Each structure stands twice: as structure tokens, then as C-alpha cells.
Image: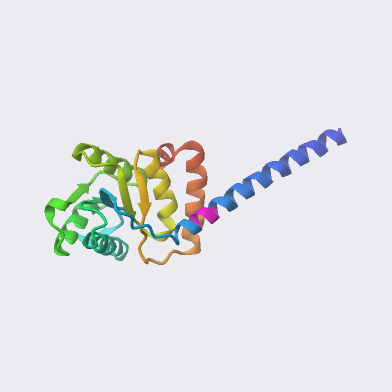
């Protein structure tokens, strides 16, 4: 009886050690990715959605759009895809607000493609991949998002068939952002991000 209990305790401690290591390594990957900035030439820049306020981009979304406009002007990609549907209470989509904002920044209307159905990162990137296939564009992209989101965005892009680089904004990421992202990545890599998105 005592011998059996010792083995149960050893197995439990072993599993706990594996979980702690897995979560710790995932946190380090999320943290490291947030500090990388890859502006390699690509077929499109994909701007991840964020809140809009009565037709105006929130500070987070504005930061992403300004960064995307800067990358476009530098010739990183000839096309910008703006992503984001409606959240509860919204009258317009994040994608449409982003489209109008980028036009006001001088980006030609023909260079902007709009994704308006996505309500989470998986849907936005999956729909963006579909838009690129429909347009006959190669599948390499530069994703613009906040630093803490960089690793998960790359993982999701890979799952939906995009070869992604990430150029994060200069937005501030908090410790709680990293903790939340670590949990999402840790679970998403096990069950896949499509299933994780379906839970939300």
C-alpha cells in the first residue's frame, strides 16, 4: 500500500514538472517573439483587428494601422489586408473603419483588402488567407499586431496556411497580457487554434 502510494506521488510530481516546464518554455517563447521585428518583403501586410469606437479606431487599432501604413510606404508589401468584424454593440466593422483610416493616410483604395467577418484571431487570419487565395497572392505575409500577440499570431497563421513574419507595434504589453497569451498558446498547440477559437 505504502509502496503504491509512493509511485502515485512520483508520477504526480513528474507530471507537474512536465506541465511547469511546458508552460515556462511557452512563456519564454511568447516573451521572445514580442521582441522580434521582421519586416521581410511579403505579398501582403495583415493588420489584426482591435476595437473601434463609433467609427474611429481605438488607440490600439490606430497604433496597428499607423504601423501598417509605415510598412506599406516602405515597400514591405503591395497589399494591406485589414481584419475585424463587429463586436457586440458595434454598428460598423473593424475592417471598414481600418479601411477608411488607411485611405485617409494616403494608401490607395486598390491596395487595401477588407476582412469583415472575423471576431477572433483565428477567424481573422483564416479569412485573410482565403482573401489571398481568391486574389491569387502568394501566402507570405507580415502580420501587424501588438507585441504580446506575436507568437500566437504566427502559430495561427501557420495553421491556416500562411507563411508569416510579424512586425509588432510599439504598444505596451503588460505581464497579464503575457500570462493570458501563454495560456492560449499552451492550449492551442495541443488542441489546435481552430478548436480553441470555437470555445470562445
Give the percent coordinates (x, y) of residue 63: 30, 64
Toward the viewer: 48 or 94?
A: 48
Colouring rule applied to residues = rainbow
- Specify whether residue 84 is in view: no
Residue 151 location, x and y as percent?
Answer: 44, 52
Pick the front one: 169 or 139: 139
Could you tell me which residue is drawn at 33 percent across and 55 percent down? 40
Report the magenta stretch's main SS: helix
Q: Is residue 98 visible?
A: yes
Q: Please name the residue shown 40% across and 48% down the image.
A: 154
Task: Please give the range of residues in magenta.
Answer: 27-31
User: Percent x, y for residue 140?
Assistant: 31, 45
If the image is split into quadrants, where does the C terminus sit? top left
Q: Is residue 21 above or below residue 160?
A: below
What residue lies at 48% left-to-right and 48% top-to-bottom? 184
Front-lying residue, 19 or 3: 19
- Count of numbered labels shown in the rendering: 0
Image quadrant assignment for residue 11: top right
- Looking at the picture, how far across and down is residue 76, in whole percent? 27, 57
Q: Is residue 15 magenta?
A: no
Q: Residue at x 35, y 38 (%)?
A: 161
Instruction: Give the residue furthest to the left.
Output: 109
Q: Is residue 130 above or below residue 174?
A: above
Image quadrant occupied by the N terminus: top right
Q: Is 29 part of what is drawn in magenta?
A: yes
Q: Is residue 59 above or below residue 86?
A: below
Amino acid at each position: 500500500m505504502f509502496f503504491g502510494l509512493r509511485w502515485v506521488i512520483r508520477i504526480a510530481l513528474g507530471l507537474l514538472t512536465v506541465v511547469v516546464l511546458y508552460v515556462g518554455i511557452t512563456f519564454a517563447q511568447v516573451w521572445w517573439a514580442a521582441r522580434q521585428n521582421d519586416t521581410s518583403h511579403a505579398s501582403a501586410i495583415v493588420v489584426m483587428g482591435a476595437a473601434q469606437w463609433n467609427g474611429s479606431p481605438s488607440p490600439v487599432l490606430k497604433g496597428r494601422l499607423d504601423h501598417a501604413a509605415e510598412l506599406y510606404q516602405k515597400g514591405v508589401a503591395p497589399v494591406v489586408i485589414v481584419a475585424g468584424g463587429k463586436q457586440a454593440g458595434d454598428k460598423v466593422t473593424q475592417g471598414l473603419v481600418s479601411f477608411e483610416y488607411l485611405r485617409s493616410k494616403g494608401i490607395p483604395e486598390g491596395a487595401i483588402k477588407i476582412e469583415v467577418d472575423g471576431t477572433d484571431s483565428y477567424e481573422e487570419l483564416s479569412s485573410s488567407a482565403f482573401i489571398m487565395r481568391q486574389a491569387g497572392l502568394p501566402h507570405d505575409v507580415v502580420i501587424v499586431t501588438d507585441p504580446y500577440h506575436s507568437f500566437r499570431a504566427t502559430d495561427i497563421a501557420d495553421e491556416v496556411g500562411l507563411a508569416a513574419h510579424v512586425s509588432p507595434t510599439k504598444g505596451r504589453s503588460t505581464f497579464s497580457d503575457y500570462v493570458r497569451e501563454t495560456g492560449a498558446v499552451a492550449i492551442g498547440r495541443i488542441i489546435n487554434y481552430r478548436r480553441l477559437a470555437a470555445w470562445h
